[in-house]
Image (tube, rainbow, N blue to C red):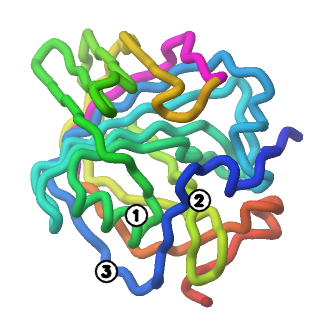
């Protein structure tokens, strides 16, 4: 069985700190999401994960963009880049990097849920026949994805998995399970194309998206709950998973 080989503190350039587990849940309404998934050409895929997680074969990269019109911190856009994996037997996605365009949202997502993001300029567009999102850091395009040929889906067709984020927590250095719930109002699938991906901008050199797998868009309410579980990053999830409610 393949397992990650890189210590968590080496994988994440800036580990966020969650000072307390006493976080109130937040609901984000009328959010537009676009997500595209690509098979990656990457050698030694174990090096992109800590020992607690297992890479999938083939390795998959997920880019998602949230367009949030209103939140306790104002409107914001968030782009996440995640690497498909498993935590024990459960499918997960490990956060390789994130970009955001609102400083208040950046601070709160980091301190409350361990989602660390870098300030960026983010463009988001959805129309009747196509959609796209683009994120730039210091005027350099980090990701540019176009989605075309939308086809309506049932709102029950989406299967969304929890993410794992590295953070310093009241329990110590941990992988934090970020597990929003979604009330989907509309969804469609697309054919995705990456116009540009700058691995250096994500500090993930050696990753190259080569084959489109899936893409979808949705309008949804997103519920950000209290953190329930964390995992030690240095041992497998069967032994290292901890309930925050018991802390």
Which segment did they paint magenta?
A: 206-220
Give the crowd class for mark 2: few <14, some 14-19, many >=20 residues within 10 Å. many
Q: Quadrant of the C terminus?
A: bottom right
Q: Position of residue 80 (x, y in %)?
A: 41, 41
Judged left or right of residue 206, residue 131 is left
The kind of secondary structure the magenta stretch mainly shows is strand
For residue 237, above or below residue 136: below
Q: Which residue is mark 1?
A: 110
Local secondary structure at mark 1: helix
Report the residue at 40% width, 64% height from top. Answer: 110
The answer to whether the residues at label 1 and label 3 have Cβ atoms under 8 Å apart is no
The local secondary structure at tag 2 comes to strand
| Residue 133, picture quadrant | top left
**Which residue lies at the image location 88% right of the left edge and 40% below the top edge?**
1
For disc 1, the neighbor class at 10 Å (few under 14, some 14 to 19, many from 20) is some
Tell me how many marks there are.
Answer: 3
Look at mark 2 in the image and give the residue it sits on: 166
Is 71 in the magenta?
no
For residue 24, which numbered disc appears in the image?
A: 3
Residue extending furthest toward the front: 138
């Amino acid at each position: 069985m393949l397992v990650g080989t890189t210590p968590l503190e080496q994988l994440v350039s800036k580990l966020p700190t969650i000072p307390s587990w006493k976080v109130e849940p937040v609901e984000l309404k009328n959010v537009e999401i676009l997500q595209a998934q690509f098979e990656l050409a990457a050698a030694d895929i174990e090096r992109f994960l800590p020992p607690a997680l297992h890479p999938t074969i083939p390795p998959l990269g997920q880019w998602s963009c949230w367009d949030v019109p209103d939140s306790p911190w104002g409107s914001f856009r968030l782009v996440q880049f995640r690497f498909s994996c498993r935590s024990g037997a459960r499918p997960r996605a490990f956060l390789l990097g994130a970009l955001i365009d609102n400083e208040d949202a950046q601070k709160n997502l980091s301190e409350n849920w361990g989602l660390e993001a870098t300030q960026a300029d983010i463009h988001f567009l959805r129309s009747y026949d196509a959609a796209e999102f683009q994120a730039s850091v210091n005027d350099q395009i980090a990701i540019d994805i176009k989605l075309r040929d939308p086809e309506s889906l049932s709102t029950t067709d989406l299967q969304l998995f929890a993410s794992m984020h590295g953070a310093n927590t009241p329990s110590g250095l941990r992988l934090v399970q970020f597990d929003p719930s979604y009330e989907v109002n509309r969804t469609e699938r697309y054919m995705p194309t990456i116009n540009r991906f700058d691995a250096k901008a994500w500090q993930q050199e050696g990753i190259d998206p080569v084959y489109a797998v899936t893409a979808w868009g949705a309008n949804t309410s997103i519920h950000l709950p209290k953190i329930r579980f964390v995992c030690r990053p240095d041992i497998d999830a069967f032994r290292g998973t901890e309930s925050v409610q018991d802390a």
